[in-house]
């Protein structure tokens, strides 16, 4: 389910400057090869106020057991109750919903829109 992620466009950078995007540095190898440790990404913190999450979306959520610890994962399924099952692209290096279960929509910080290059 590997998808590409575009580099930040001038529009994305302007949205970041206007605080409509949040910037985050990737840590860990769970999203390799798509995202590398140390890379920076931009997140749309209002994405799910306008639309529902979709399978395949790359998101930043708060870890269920470490609420202040952001994690970058892909939505791989949406349960009937609306909870989201997350997984890292690098399944051998990822701690995700396979170990902590599905998360709720209110645990999502935002949708990853681009790499901040």
Image (cartoon, helix red, strand yellow):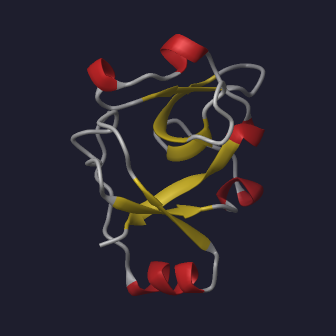
Q: Is residue 103 left or right of residue 32?
A: right
Out of 65 and 33, give the one closest to the viewer: 65
Q: Quadrant of residue 46?
A: bottom right
- Give the quadrant of the C terminus: bottom left
Residue shown at 64% from the left, 78% from the top: 19
Expressed as whole percent of the image width and height from the top left, the position of residue 53 reads 63, 43
Q: Quadrant of residue 17?
A: bottom right
Residue with the most extreme left position: 33
Expressed as whole percent of the image width and height from the top left, the position of residue 9 reads 38, 80
Out of 66 and 16, give the one closest to the viewer: 66
Expressed as whole percent of the image width and height from the top left, the position of residue 37 reads 28, 48
Expressed as whole percent of the image width and height from the top left, the position of residue 94 reads 37, 25
Q: Is residue 91 left or right of residue 74?
A: left
- Give the quadrant of the N terminus: top left
Residue shown at 78% from the left, 21% from the top: 81
Residue shown at 65% from the left, 61% from the top: 45
Q: Quadrant of residue 88?
A: top left
């Amino acid at each position: 389910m590997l998808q590409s992620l575009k580099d930040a466009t001038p529009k994305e950078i302007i949205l970041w400057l206007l605080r409509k995007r949040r910037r985050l540095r990737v840590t860990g190898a769970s999203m390799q090869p798509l995202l590398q440790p140390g890379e920076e990404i931009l997140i749309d913190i209002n994405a799910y106020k306008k639309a529902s999450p979709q399978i395949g979306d790359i998101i930043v959520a708060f870890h269920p057991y470490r609420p202040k610890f952001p994690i970058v994962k892909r939505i791989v399924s949406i349960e009937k109750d609306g909870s989201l099952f997350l997984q890292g692209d690098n399944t051998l290096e990822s701690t995700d919903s396979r170990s902590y279960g599905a998360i709720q929509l209110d645990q999502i910080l935002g949708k990853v829109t681009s790499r901040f290059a």
